[in-house]
Amino acid sequence: MKNIELIWAKRFQQYLKELFKYLRFVFATSYIAVIIAGSFAVAYYMKWLQVVPYDFPSEWLVSTICGVLLSISSPVTLIREPDQVYFLQLESRMDSYFRKALKWTYWSQIFAVLVIYCAAIPLLLKVESPSLWKILLGLCAVLILKYINVQIEFLNHRKKQGRHRFIDRLLRMSLSIIILKLAIEGEIIFFFIFIVIFVVYEKQDRKKAILEPIPFDYFSKIESTRMARFYRFVSYFTDVPFLKENISRRSWLDFATKLISYDQKNSSLYLIVRTFMRTDESVYLWLRLTIISSFIAAFVNVPFVVWVIVSALSFATIYQIKHMFISPRGVRMNAFYPIPVSNQQIAVNKLLRALMLLQGSIVLLSSFVQSASLISFILIIIIGEMTIRFTGTK
């Protein structure tokens, strides 16, 4: 049997190759939108810093956001289903494999927290004016806490196979928030006391976990679930042929199909609406982008920024849902019925227009929190209609 570290190295190379293979499609199609959105976000953030009140709870805000991200530390093990059999004889030598896996988990997840913490430094300096050593202590706390959280979450998976994971994560989140706030405030004594508590918590978990057999079947399941989330995200930008759609029964949306009159000419519309309602990917996509548009319309007070973002999200919503229906893994129920293709296309357009109007109406209602403006609603309708008419159908 090969050296266990060589097995990790080979799998890691294959994993990176798979990531870059699909991420290049993501960046190729959306890097302009990311640059524009990032530029607007930075400009708005700098403008907001000039008027932020001095009693703003910046320390709590930064500690909470970073603490939540620090506590979410799912391990990247790259364990596969056949390993349930082939790795059993290597169980006593798996420590070196998991050390490599947890090292990658740490460095791949710490970057987002560091970016947010560094971006929050101007806010802390504006409101709290902390000393440089307090900022650096907070940075050290982020690095230490992420390492401990990664170790504890892995041990929780190994020992309990995910049972009581919510309670464990909630406890680690609370400790991370408190420790990070103590670091930013410069409370060194209490900071080290809570760090010791956290380390003792990790050591106790480790003593119990090493007595348990390695649940290779469980690790393979969480790894396949993690990759499925990645492929589902990538599918918004390019086709992933082997991706399986998740189907859920949503009885609370049955009223939508009841609105369709019982007629033979509406057969295609009924099937398409039913497919949309039961497909997790399509429903969550529309819901997610609608919530983001509504949030932007409600709380961003720069009209041009709002118009650009809601227009971009309107295009993304209609284009991606349309792509779901015209891709090879799109609507399959129609294949069992003798319905002309033209009727299917008309039905898809009706569904897209209904979703477009509903999204625009929600954004319009959200804008009343700040200002009653019809421009966002009109832009959503115009961009959505143009997307329906001028994007490809093959």
Image: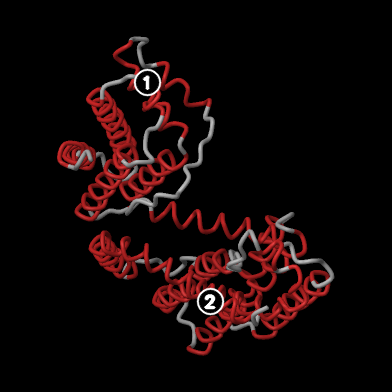
- Of helix, strand and loop, which one carries label 2? helix
- Point out which mark residue 10 bears: 2
Side (left or right) of 213 relative to 137? right
Total label count?
Answer: 2
Where's residue 364, x and y in %?
29, 37
Q: Position of residue 7 (x, y in %)?
A: 60, 76
User: Residue at the location (41% across, 46% down)?
Assistant: 288
Find disc 1 in the rendering and name its residue: 337
Residue 344: name its quadrant.
top left
Q: Residue furthest front?
A: 1
User: Which quadrant holds the N terminus?
Assistant: bottom right
- The residue located at (32%, 11%) in the rendering is 264
Q: Amino acid at mark 1?
A: Tyr
Which is nearer the eye, 75 or 382? Answer: 75
Please determine whether, in this image, residue 151 is positioned above or below residue 386: below
Q: In which quarter of the view is residue 81 placed?
A: bottom right
Crowding at dot 1, Cα within 10 Å, few <14 / some 14-19 / many 20+, comes out as few
Q: Nearer the viewer, residue 16 or 296?
A: 16
Between 150 and 10, the one lying in front of the other is 10
Q: Earlier in the sequence, mark 2 or mark 1?
A: 2
Cα–Cα span, label 2 and label 1: 47 Å
Is the image coloured rainbow, by chain, by secondary structure, or in one colour?
Answer: secondary structure
